[in-house]
Each structure stands twice: as structure tokens, then as C-alpha cells.
Amino acid sequence: MCGICGELRFDGLKPDMAAISRMSDQLARRGPDNAGSYCHGPLAFGHRRLSIIDLSSHANQPMVDSALELALVFNGTIYNYRELRTELQGMGYQFFSEGDSEVILKSYHAWGDQCVTRFKGMFAFCLWDQRSGQLFLARDRFGIKPLYLTQDKQRLRFASSLPALLAGGGVDTRLDAVALHHHFTLHTVVPAPRTVLKGVRKLPPATTMLIDPDGSQSQQVYWTLDATRPAQEVSEAQWLAATRDALAKSVDRRLLAADVPVGVLLSGGLDSSLLVGLLADHVEDLRTFSIGFEDMGNGTEKADEFEFSDQVAAHFKTRHKQYSIPNSEVLTRLPEAVEQMTEPMASYDVIAFYLLSEKVSQDVKVVMSGQGADEVFGGYFWYPEMDAAQGTPLERFSQHYFDRDHAEYLQMITPAFQVGDVTSELVAAELAKPDADEFLDEVWRFDATTLLVDDPVKRVDNMPMAWGLEVRTPFLDHELVELAAKMPPALKLKEGGKYPLKAMARGLIPDSVIDRPKGYFPVPALRYVRGAFLDKMREILLSDACLKRGLYQRDYVEKLLAEPEGPNAFTRINGSKLWHLALLEWWLQVHVDPLVG
């Protein structure tokens, strides 16, 4: 787990090593254990290392294989690297390190661009072929590891974060109007390859890119998700047994691929509790961590899930730590979280992950987390609502997911940034793709391959890595997701959703955790739009920078500010919309404005 960056020139000039240094410095928090750089002809790499597998200097990066004339920078973990190493040794390859990075080098030499189909893990890497002058880039199937790109006629640059590319300089920071439409419609998700900035793109998940010396490039999608039923009928008992087997293998892979202790982020919900149950017999002195927040004193909503996480920790006798964060600290530390955001992310979970990761990183370098289970196994309340809705697939999806319809978007955004209903077009096209039997199969495939990538997965990389903490997500093992995608929707939605996981958990974790209502990470200081939080949003949205940017229609902003918790305090719809507007503006003021003015 690391931070990577680099530059490839197309104009005959040498790479800008000062820009590499600036990008690497910006990535320092992702990899506090070692820094390195490499330059060969038109290509330069920078690397920041978080040492997890093969802690010796032999595994430092950039990694150069002189015999094969290949060089690599890599962020992530290849969980099956030992099996691949054994296979490669059988083919005659000799190794100088014990980690997974060198396995990527040998695999590329052995199998070319198809090496990625053999990898089980999370990864973003860039590999330089000294002989051909070609650069090969790859990203894992679910985009768990990020890879941002900026390119012009002179050069291509890449980095593990968008702010790192900005630190390199020379980026077109104008706003992308299409990306803005996605951002404000899909819970601040901007699907790859776009970002909110015109000059920065993301390599899509499950995609490789090969760049030739003249700058020409080709992309290949190496994996897609099939959501059709098996040819032969599968019984419920067979589905449940297959789920148990696939999840157990996923957890084992993520446990064994580490030369340091592995803990668990224990929320108190079904997903993380199930991980603890699967690990407890395999890990002596298992470490678990929970976070909670100060409630608002109104007695209507608990701001922590300690009641349940404590039960799980006691049941399995883990070495447990819980952290309770006062509201004053949430608001005080919020600017830090915005500064660390690689893209603007409005979910209240972001600050929770940031503060929890700070604490956890003092004890361990690697944790497992339950992200992805709800999207893969049908855990959110809107899935059955979508299923019961009438209309086209787009209509059924949008009325239960979109933050605002296109008409309201046009009322919010100024004419200079208005576009057609591009998000509806994108969603309709994604849902209409072949190889999905039912409507919910289409939805879950879209969720797992697109929406999940740029919402929970992005923040689970971004915020913990700001503290040098690697988070592994067993529910996003591609073999487990492939299995779940073929299940009948009715099986997943049984007993309120995630039935296969609930059935698996019976007898393993306390029933009180399995049968509890689904919780959502509560952060009351941000959930209730009042006091200092409202004052901060008002300050941002009425600032000279915001007014000069001219992004928002002022009557729309003033309406939200006049009734921040309307239409009523229970739904808090206006407050959420207000935060979406303020967060993007705040992010732009922190990351973009200092570079352009």
C-alpha cells in the first residue's frame, strides 16, 4: 500500500524531476516508510512506501528488474502473490525479494497485458518497459486503488491522488460541466474516467492502458460482471454454502498477505461483526476498533453503535478499543478532512473514517472493513423500493437514488455550467447493458462496478491512507462478487436484505447483532445543519471566491440557507443539499484556487 506518481514525456525532453518531487511530497502521508524515485529516458517515477509485505529494503520502490529491463511503481496488494510466485519460479524466474511487487514484474514479462487477469487483489500500478519504451498502467476490478491522469501533447502524468497531480503543476483546473451533473445527482459520485476538473481523468476500474513512445494509447477492459442466472438450478442451501466458502477464502487471502498484524474496523453491524467471527479462530489477540460520536442531547438518535460492537468484542475476546469523538472535535477537524480529500466527498462517513484512522494507525498498519456488503448483497432500503416501483429501469432507479432531478439541477447551477440530462443518459445506458437477468441485477451490477467505486470505496482508501493505514475489503473479492451477482434477487432481499450473510452469521455471532435494524454511521455534528456547522457553510457559500466562481444560482443558495433543515427536521433534505454545495466550493478553495490565483 503506497503512493505512486510519474511522468512520461512525448516531446523529447527529460522528465521534470522537480514536479515528481512535488507530487511525491504530496503523497508522503500514504507511504511514510520509504521514498524513492527513478528516471530512464523520457520516463520518471516517484514512490512513497507503506511497508506491509517484505519489510526489507529489497521490496522498496520504484522496483527495477535489470535482467528483464522493467521498472515498476505499485500501490495495493496482490493477495495471491505466493501462488503466482511459485508458478513463475516453475517457469524459471528467479526472485530478489519476497513481496508482491516483484511478482507483478515477472507476471508482466511472462504473460504480458493479461497478467492482470491472474491477480487477486487491489492494485494500481505503472510498469515501464525499457526496451520498447512503452508504459503499461492497470487498475483493479473495483477501483479500490486510485489512479489519476493528466495529459497533453508534451507529457502524461499520473498519481495516486488528484491533489498530487495539482502539485505537479500545469493542470487544466476548469470545471467539467458533465462531471458536475454527475456529482450533484449521484451522491457526489463522478464515474471514471471523469473528475470535476477538465484536466484530470481517472483510469477506469478493470482497465489497462498501454502508452507508446509517441503518446498514442490503447485501453482494454479486462473484466466485466456477469449478472445472469447459472444454466443449472441452484438450491438455497447451495447458494449459502458457496457464499460461506467464498467469503472465508476472501478473508483468508487478506489475512495471509501481510507481514504485519491485521485488525478489524468493527462498526457493530452485521458485516464487520461477521469478519471478526471469521477471523477470531485464526488470529491470536485479534485487534478491533470502533468509533462513536457525541449525540445532540435530544434523545432521538444514538450517535454510536457501541452497544453492538461491545457485544461482538466480548463474545470473541478481541483486544478492543473504542473512541468517542465530541462534536467540537468533529467541527474542528473537518478542515483537515477536506484538505485530505482526493475528490470532494459529501458523505458524513468521510470525517468518521478520517478520525478513526488516525487512532487505529497508531496500533496497526492494516485493517479489514465491511464496505461493499450492502451493495453486493442488497442491504440498503432503497433496493426493494426500486424493485416495487413502476416505470422504466431509469425511472425506477432515479426516483429512489438521485439527489435532485434535472429540473432542480438547472435551478441550482448557473447557465455557464448547464448541460443536458447527462446523468440519466449514463444510468440508462449502464442499466441497459447485456448479461443481467432482472432489474435488480442491473442495479447491483451498476452499483458494484461504478457507484461503489467512487463513493464508499474511494473514501475507504482516501481517508485511512492519509494516516498510512491500509484497509482491506473482503466483501469486494471479485470471486465473491461474481457469485453474488448470479444469485436470484429474492434470495438477497429475504429477511430484509443480505440474507446469505445473515444465514452465514447464525451461530457465529450474537443474534442481537444479526437481527438489529440496519444502522447508518451517525455523525450528529454534521447530520444536523445548525450552529457552527451551518455558520461554516454560510461563510463558504457567501464568500468572495464562491461568488466570483459563479457556479450556483444565488436564489437557490439563499433558499437553502433560509431553511437549512427543511422541509422538516426529520428528513433534513435541504441540509444535505446545502452541504453538497458547500463541500464542493470548500474543496475548490482548498485545492484549486491557490494554484490559479
Image: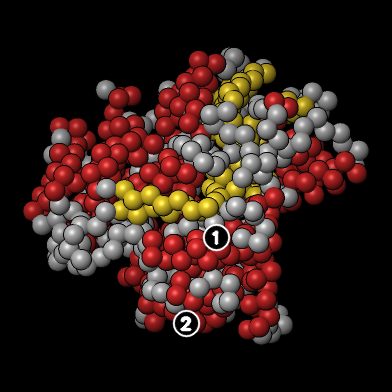
Closer to the observer: label 1 or label 2?
A: 1
Q: Quadrant of residue 60?
A: top right
Q: Is residue 62 above or below residue 236?
A: above
Which residue is at the far left? 562
Residue 509 position within the rendered picture, expressed as x and y whole percent measured from the top left: 54, 71
Residue 7 position within the rendered picture, expressed as x and y whole percent measured from the top left: 56, 25
Identify the residue at image location x=55%, y=60%: 317
* Alpha carbon separation for disc pair 1 and 2: 29 Å
- Quadrant holding the C terminus: top left
Q: Which mark is on residue 79?
A: none
Amino acid carrying mark 1 in the image: Lys
Q: Quadrant of residue 133?
A: top right
Q: Which mark is on residue 317?
A: 1
Task: Kindly check if marks 1 and 2 are in contact, taking CB atoms under 8 A apart as contact.
Answer: no
Q: Is residue 286 above or below residue 159?
A: below
Disc 2 target residue: 495
What is the secondary structure assignment of the residue under circle 1? loop
Task: Say few, some or many: other residues with alpha carbon within 10 Å of mark 1 (under 14 / 14 to 19 / 20 or more).
Answer: some
Res 380 seen here? yes
Residue 210 position within the rendered picture, expressed as x and y whole percent measured from the top left: 66, 37
Task: Say few, some or many: other residues with alpha carbon within 10 Å of mark 2 (under 14 / 14 to 19 / 20 or more).
Answer: few
Q: State which tag comes first along the sequence, 1 or 2.
A: 1
Residue placed most toward the observer, 383 or 329:
329
Residue 412 position within the rendered picture, expressed as x and y whole percent measured from the top left: 20, 52
Q: Quadrant of residue 58?
A: top right
Identify the residue at image location x=67%, y=76%: 241
- Quadrant holding the N terminus: top right
Amino acid carrying mark 2 in the image: Glu
